[in-house]
Image (cartoon, grey):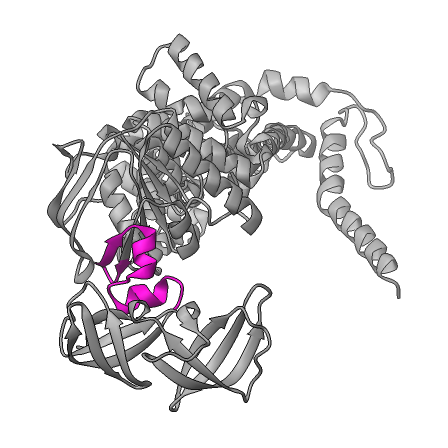
């Protein structure tokens, strides 16, 4: 078989897989969210017989969607910023300071990711209750998210700190730059893509996080995922769940596209190391 | 335009001694090269002068001011990095002006100095570009401009040409030397390339294993190396063990060597009875002479164009000759001689 033929087959297989994995569930969610309650969408029909935005309006009016959106979209950016601030000193140490056991330390910071989220959540929330931090539920969840998502931020920022070139720092210093100026000219350009990536990943993880938000927050503090999971309970209404699922997904997709843009527009010479 | 005075400098990293007992003075406007193989301590010495390292012992003075503990940002030195270290996100203009901005030099003077510098380095057309849009030679010039615009008392170079291709290297080398002389800059230049050192320097400091082997003008270094390391590192040499048998007349020493009895005419007094001596491959004359003559059998010949390399056997030992006569072939026996002043006395045999 010719190379081109193989390429073509692989290409089409990939597109098929992508379609099955991404496009079909997404389309289904959109269709389900548009099902009008006057006539149900039964298995014998390819498309819903009557389509309307009734479910969207209904969820907006009759569920805790509004406070949930507010909570999620305040919580996630706060968690992203707090996590980044907490992770940066460790990342600096792991990325720029030579000390014995550095590689082991790098590995250990990643270990929390091995434990299933729910296990961490249950025991982490018990610590929060013991510390008496649950009184301010938003703060407790923010604290928990920051701690639990820190491995991602540390990992990303460590790599970024490693990419800062010592000769740039030295050159700035040799030309009389103060500590702040050295950060601006030598560190920040190399760290910027990492900072964006860390913020975004923590944002997405936090906005999708269910276990801690549920255990610590319920019933008074709702986020979009806790709301979504509660609609999956005994009064499960698929169209309503579809609305919530889409609300959860759409901003993430937009954020991913923004990140992609930012990373592409970042100075290519920084990643190639030339110049 | 400052002087540099280094006194009994020592640098240790843990148990490793990188530099030992370094004392040297550099005059105003002088171009001094630190030359040596990798790991000899030349870059460490440069980092000590620029302030990125603090010595274990000893002092460094720049313009008669003790700067041993002064950090690099407060020293009147400017360093040209091997990697250029241009800030990739800043334009050429911003790169060159960076140091002036740190020093809060006002806008009109900054503009004036930038124009002068861009003119001098032929960078006028590149000022709005980013470093990665420039060729290696141009980037090198930007790095030079960024250092020179500070009008430093001392300019330091850390192997600035090692990332350029051979042809470009020659032209940039001429340019660096021209700018240094035009501005009467005191310069310290690190390299491992002996031809670079010989071609550019007022004086060369040869380092080996953290100690100074010799500090001398290039001509002296070549014609009168003081150690076998220098003799071999600069230009190549035939080094032999010799026993000093006496002084036949003032400044003329009789020697017993593996290629026979020889005499050396030298201002130096032999360091011991058993010393090393050397002669340059091109110092050999292919004629008989009453003194210092010997017969050599050619074992190998390499034609190089303007000269021919001959590998010869003299009494069972291998040596190297350079001759302008391309008509000598392996197997031939040739009569050779060396002028007594071309037989150089080196250090004592340990």
Would residue B224 be counted in the magenta stretch? yes
Rendering coords of residue A252 (x, y %): 59, 31
User: Where, quadrant-wise, is the N terminus of chain B in this rendering?
Assistant: top left
Write the residue at 55% across / 43% down. A272
Expressed as whole percent of the image width and height from the top left, the position of residue B218 reads 34, 52
Q: Which residue ends up furthest to the front in the rendered image? A: B290
Q: Nearer the viewer, residue A102 or A266?
A: A266
Name, please, the residue furthest toward the top.
B108
Q: Position of residue B54 (x, y in %)?
A: 18, 44
Can you say whether B59 is above or below B15 in the image? Answer: above
**In the picture shown, does residue A35 fall above or below B306?**
above
For residue A260, what is the image quadrant?
top right
Magenta includes A11? no
Res. A44 in view: yes
Task: Tell me what residue is drawn at x 75 percent, y 40 percent.
Answer: A23
* Horizontal arrangement in the rendering, residue A186 relative to residue B248 (left or right): right
**Position of the C terminus of chain B by quadrant:** bottom left
Using residue A81 as the reference point, say whether residue B186 is left or right of it. left
Question: Looking at the image, is B248 positioned above or below residue A56?
Answer: below
Q: Is residue A194 visible?
A: no
Residue extent of the magenta highlight: B207-236
Residue A257 percent across, percent down from the top left: 63, 31
């Amino acid at each position: 078989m010719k190379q081109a033929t193989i390429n073509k087959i692989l290409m089409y297989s990939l597109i098929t897989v992508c379609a099955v994995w991404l496009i079909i569930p997404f389309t289904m969610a959109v269709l389900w969210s548009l099902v009008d309650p006057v006539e149900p969408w039964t298995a014998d029909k390819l498309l819903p017989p009557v389509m309307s935005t009734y479910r969207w309006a209904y969820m907006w009016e009759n569920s805790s969607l509004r406070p949930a959106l507010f909570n999620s979209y305040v919580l996630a950016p706060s968690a992203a910023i707090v996590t980044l601030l907490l992770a940066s000193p460790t990342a600096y140490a792991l990325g720029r300071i030579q000390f014995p056991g550095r590689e082991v330390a790098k590995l250990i910071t990643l270990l929390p990711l091995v434990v299933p989220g729910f296990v961490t959540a249950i025991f982490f929330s018990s610590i929060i209750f013991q510390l008496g931090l649950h009184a301010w539920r938003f703060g407790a969840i923010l604290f928990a998210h920051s701690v639990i998502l820190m491995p991602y931020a540390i990992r990303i920022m460590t790599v970024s700190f490693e990419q800062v070139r010592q000769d740039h720092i030295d050159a700035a210093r040799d030309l009389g730059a103060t500590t702040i100026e050295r950060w601006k000219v030598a560190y920040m350009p190399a760290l910027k893509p990492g900072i964006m990536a860390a913020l975004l990943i923590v944002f997405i993880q936090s906005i999708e996080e269910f276990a801690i938000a549920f255990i610590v927050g319920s019933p008074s503090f709702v986020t979009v995922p806790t709301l979504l999971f509660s609609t999956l309970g005994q009064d499960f209404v698929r169209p309503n769940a579809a609305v919530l699922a889409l609300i959860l997904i759409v901003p993430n997709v937009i954020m991913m596209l923004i990140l992609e843009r930012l990373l592409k527009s970042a100075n290519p010479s920084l990643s190639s190391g030339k110049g | 335009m400052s002087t540099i005075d280094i006194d009994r400098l020592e640098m240790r990293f843990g148990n490793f001694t990188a530099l030992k007992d370094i004392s040297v003075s550099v005059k105003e406007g002088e171009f001094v090269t630190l030359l040596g193989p990798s790991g000899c301590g030349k870059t460490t010495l440069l980092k000590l002068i620029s302030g990125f390292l603090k010595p274990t012992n000893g002092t460094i003075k720049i313009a008669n001011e003790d700067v041993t503990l002064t950090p690099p940002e407060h020293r009147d030195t400017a360093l040209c990095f091997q990697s250029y270290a241009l800030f990739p996100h800043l334009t050429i203009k911003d790169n060159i002006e960076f140091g002036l901005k740190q020093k809060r030099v006002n806008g009109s003077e900054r503009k004036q100095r930038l124009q002068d510098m861009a003119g001098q380095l032929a960078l006028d057309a590149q000022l709005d570009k980013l470093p990665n849009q420039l060729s290696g030679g141009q980037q090198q010039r930007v790095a030079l401009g960024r250092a020179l615009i500070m009008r430093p008392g001392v300019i330091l170079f850390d192997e600035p040409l090692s990332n350029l291709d051979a042809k470009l290297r020659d032209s940039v080398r001429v340019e660096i030397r021209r700018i240094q002389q035009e501005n009467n800059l005191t310069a310290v230049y690190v390299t491992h390339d002996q031809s670079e050192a010989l071609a550019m320097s007022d004086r060369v400091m040869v380092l080996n294993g953290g100690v100074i082997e010799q500090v001398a003008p290039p001509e002296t270094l070549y014609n009168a190396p003081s150690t076998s390391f220098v003799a071999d590192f600069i230009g190549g040499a035939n080094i032999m063990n010799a026993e000093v048998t006496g002084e036949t007349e003032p400044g003329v020493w009789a020697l017993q060597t593996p290629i026979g009895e020889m005499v050396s005419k030298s201002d130096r007094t032999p360091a011991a009875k058993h010393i090393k001596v050397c002669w340059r491959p091109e110092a050999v004359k292919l004629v008989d002479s009453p003194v210092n003559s010997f017969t050599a059998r050619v074992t190998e010949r390499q034609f190089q164009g303007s000269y021919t390399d001959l590998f010869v056997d003299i009494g069972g030992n291998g040596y190297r000759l350079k001759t302008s006569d391309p008509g000598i072939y392996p197997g031939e026996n040739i009569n050779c001689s060396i002028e007594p002043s071309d037989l150089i006395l080196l250090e004592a045999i340990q």
